[in-house]
Image (cartoon, helix red, strand yellow):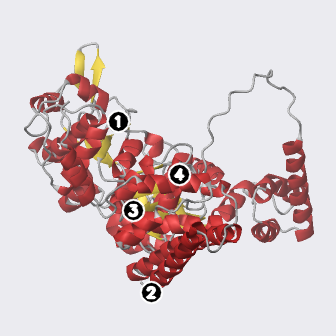
Amino acid sequence: MPRIAQADVDEVKSRTNIADVVGERVALRSAGVGSMKGLCPFHDEKSPSFHVRPQVGFYHCFGCGASGDVYTFLREMDHVSFTEAVERLAGRIGFTLHYEDGGSAPNESSGRSRLYAVNAAAAEWFREQLMTPEADTARRFLGSRGFDPGAAAHFGVGYAPRGWSNMLDALRRKGFSVEELTAAGVVSQGQRGVYDRFRGRVLWPIRDVTGQTIGFGARKLYEDDQGPKYLNTPETPIYKKAQVLYGLDLAKRDISRGDPKRVVVVEGYTDVMAAHLAGVTTAVATCGTAFGTDHITLLRRVMGDESAAGEVVFTFDPDAAGQKAALRAFADSKRFNARTYVAVAPDGLDPCDLRLQRGDGAVRALMDTKVPMFEFVIDQKIAGYDLASVEGRVGAIRAAVPIVADIADAPTRAGYERVLAQRVGSDLSDVHRAVQSALHRGREKGAEPTRHTAPEQPAPTPALQSVTLATLPSTPEVRKDTEALVAILQFGHLIDTPLLTRAVGVQLTHPGLDAVREGIRAVPERSRPGWAMTAVENVREPYRVLAGELLASEFHANSETAAKNVAAEHVRNLIDRDLKRQKHDLVGALRRATAESEEGRAISRRIVELEMETRRLREE
């Protein structure tokens, strides 16, 4: 593949706000002037350690060490090549790329980009088919569920015609190969050859959090269809059903802006549509799989729920399957910082049927019926026991106590002990003793020694350990040097060039910090965009992670003007300390020299020069 001209690579990056790209996947909030932070998309965490600095186009996670520019972010998140990352961002801003051998973009792209292109083309084709005469059955189905053409268009709903290879033929005419269509999961291989996976069905495009179509969910319409009621895209390199939530691309904006931030988890595509059309615009649904850990991770990044102020509301049918789904969700809901609730509609109606029978207001009012997840699960556990009998109450307590004992927060656990005691009709002291006993058993079980141990293996050769901010000694001089380097990396472009040049020539005491200084010094032009990234890349190992942390660290200032002044003051302090050190050394040398000697007079002159330089520094 031809290489993209370097000037275009730089231009696209300079025109792209990294916070916009990251913000499509992670809820970011201000972390001081020029800095934003959120929950890291590269590892699971409950407190945000992922920092983004839009002005320098850089991100860094203090938890897992992930760092880089906007191209690195796309490559790591979407597993695309560097060229594909540049092309995607260029398309985003409408920039025409040029390639080193001349001309425009090559006709063929590789890997995941082609899979995205297949899904986008298929989604467009399916939407077009919804307007054909054959799709009357699909349109009538949507109408029966309360969805007009405008609603169908908003959610990108389409129709897959009956037949063997209608879509296959259409997309091949657009230049896609059978291999690409197969890899994207829109066609299947059978004994009679390759055929359309979706036929005679109404389809919903499944999009990732950025809005790119990655797969489809399809419902059958005809009685002679022998397939399952719902059929989804199979697992592909870009579609992992356990890692996607239908409707999140539409809901994420209102989720992140809510007060409190609320996510409503419903059960199907039509439920998401009904909820959004009724005004519950934060509704999402899983895609043919149970709600699980990966879904929690995805939602937490969008919610940015480190404050525990958010809400996640699950809607389930009150039947046995719905109760099982609630209990399964409860097992994972403890991973949320947000408060978790369950809302069950009257008569067991799902949001779509509730909207049809009782209107939009009833769907919105469903949120008023929510109960805390712990209460709901306790009620499910004790249901079926005869609470009028002693045996029934004892059995109910035994069934529900593990739920209460598993609550980590002691005050919350005590509150739910009272809830259980009230539900069962027993003394609080009885419930408390049962919970304490369960806690004691859990601690004993956790303390049991492992009975089987693996055979001893030779110790691996230790790798070169990266130096980080956490490993630096906590001394006043190191703290001051650290502050100065943070100021230079983040706001060096605002500092007078002579002053900055003088500062980066000052040797620092700690070898890691001095290695970062050398990396900065190696960049001749410190006012151009992206210079700080180049400086970080210049730093030798094992100090490059430290440099990235300095570039991403919070800088305490409430405006750019204040940041400029504070940064300049840090730089002056660095130079001033160096001048004082030089003067101290010279005074010692003067004591050892003869005052009237040529050496003594030269030392005295240099001391005077240093004193004058110090005064000028403070007058600037």
Give percent across and percent down for residue 491.
41, 69
* Mark 3–mark 2 CB contact (< 8 Å): no
Task: Look at discs 1 and 4 and give the one toward the viewer.
Answer: 4
Inter-mark Cα distance, 3 to 4: 42 Å
For the residue marked with disc 3, what is the amino acid? Answer: Lys
In front of the other: 136 or 301:
301
In front of the other: 183 or 5:
5
Q: Which labelled disc corresponds to residue 233?
A: 1
Inter-mark Cα distance, 2 to 4: 30 Å
Secondary structure beneath label 1: loop
Task: Look at discs 3 and 2 and give the one toward the viewer.
Answer: 2
Q: Which labelled disc corresponds to residue 619?
A: 2
For the residue marked with disc 2, what is the amino acid? Answer: Glu
Local crowd size for mark 1, using a 10 Å CA cut-off: few (<14), some (14–19), many (≥20): many
Q: What residue is pinned by disc 3? A: 252
Q: Quadrant of the N terminus?
A: top left
Give percent across and percent down for residue 375.
68, 64
Is residue 347 shown above or below 105? below
